[in-house]
Image (tube, grey):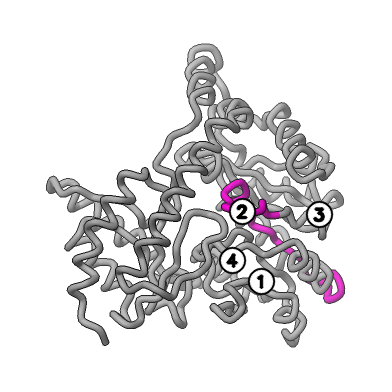
Amino acid sequence: MSVSIDPFHAMGVSRIAHALKAEGRSIIHMEFGQPSTGAPAAALARAHAVLDSDPMGYWESPELKARIARHYLDTHGLTVAPERILLTCGASPALVTALAGGFSPGDTIAIARPGYVAYRNTIRALKLNVHEIACGPESQYRLSAEAIAALDPAPRGLIVASPANPTGAIIPAAGLAALAEVCRRRNIQIISDEIYHGLTYGEPTRSMLAFAPDAVVINSFSKYFSMVAWRLGWMVAPADQVEHYRAYAANLFLTAPSLSQHAALAAMDCADELDRHVAAYGVNRQLMLDALPELGLTAIAPPDGAFYIYADVGHLTDDSLAFCQQMVRDTGVATAPGIDFDPVDGRRFIRISFAVSTDETREALRRLQPWFAARPRL
């Protein structure tokens, strides 16, 4: 019998936004974690050249895997054999591969709450059990080793995200090391979601591989590399389980798109262009941090990385989905309801993505100021 999972409510908000746009309304999309910029210029040029010269087919680029391996050496000082890297059709198939290949039905996987909606739902869809660990403002929305040590019985797996979605919270190096140690001691397999690496506004975050070499690491070209629609990600598998995970990935998803692999290889050498995007996100972040208190949003998560602000709107609503639906209808600004990320307390939170242009950020704040001012308090 199939397993029932929750819908992705932000997609419902987005459908309303697109319907309004089709009616001629001006819409600012801040509901999804997707850059408003496109792929780097060199990646587009490479794709055009390949389209004219290569019929393509099922393929896994050895050059791209070697370049990703060099990225770990250059960025983190870590030696990762290219053979450990599996190219996937985005980070989502990498997550499915990691969960399906690493665990058996009935196993328990621990995750932070709030956390990315697809963690909970993918775990359940694969007939695994999910254990959500509350990580609120008292812990700066960070998962801690103490929380994992307190679990009885120990889960079989743990998903760690730093920077995290929806909060942008970063776990410092000491915290990652402590998580790795408690998981090693309790025989808990770590899956580290690192898709927001490169998107930080202070000290860069560390890879879990520095502390747990046998962790399964997931990453993507969708966020920092601004290649959402190209559907390309990767997974770093433990050295002694590469063929095991490769079998799952190949049977479930065949190979990643060949054109995307060609383009991604070029994108990896576009740091100057991509870092300008991050600088723009930093400007947007500061604009929002300055303006949100004027909207009455004073309780927010610390957005140290990624491109989100997770804001408490509990003084205005206890139904974040209806709140976001009304907001987009009234203002044309689309945001994500907190219930996607936290089924317990998310009814009083919204997530706002600032991965849009700076002009759009300013315009969104201009529209939201009178709307929030007119909202009755509970």
Residue 221's label in the rendered image is none
Dot 2 crowding, Cα within 10 Å, few <14, some 14–19, many 20+? few
Residue 137 drawn at (x, y percent): 54, 78
Sooner in the amino-acid sequence: mark 3 or mark 4 = 4
The overriding secondary structure of the stretch rendered in magenta is loop
Q: What residue is pinned by disc 3?
A: 210
Label 3–label 1 contact, CB within 8 A: no
Structural distance between the alpha carbons of marks 4 and 1: 7 Å
Pair 2/4: label in front = 2
Q: Amino acid at mark 3?
A: Ala
Secondary structure, mark 4, is loop
Secondary structure, mark 3, is helix
Q: What residue is pinned by disc 1?
A: 105
Is residue 175 shown left or right of residue 267? right
Q: Amino acid at mark 1?
A: Pro
Structural distance between the alpha carbons of marks 3 and 1: 30 Å
Sooner in the amino-acid sequence: mark 2 or mark 1 = 1
Secondary structure, mark 2, is loop
Label 4–label 1 contact, CB within 8 A: yes
- What stretch of residues is rendered in magenta? 184-205
Label 3–label 2 contact, CB within 8 A: no
Q: What residue is pinned by disc 4?
A: 126
Q: Is residue 163 magenta?
A: no
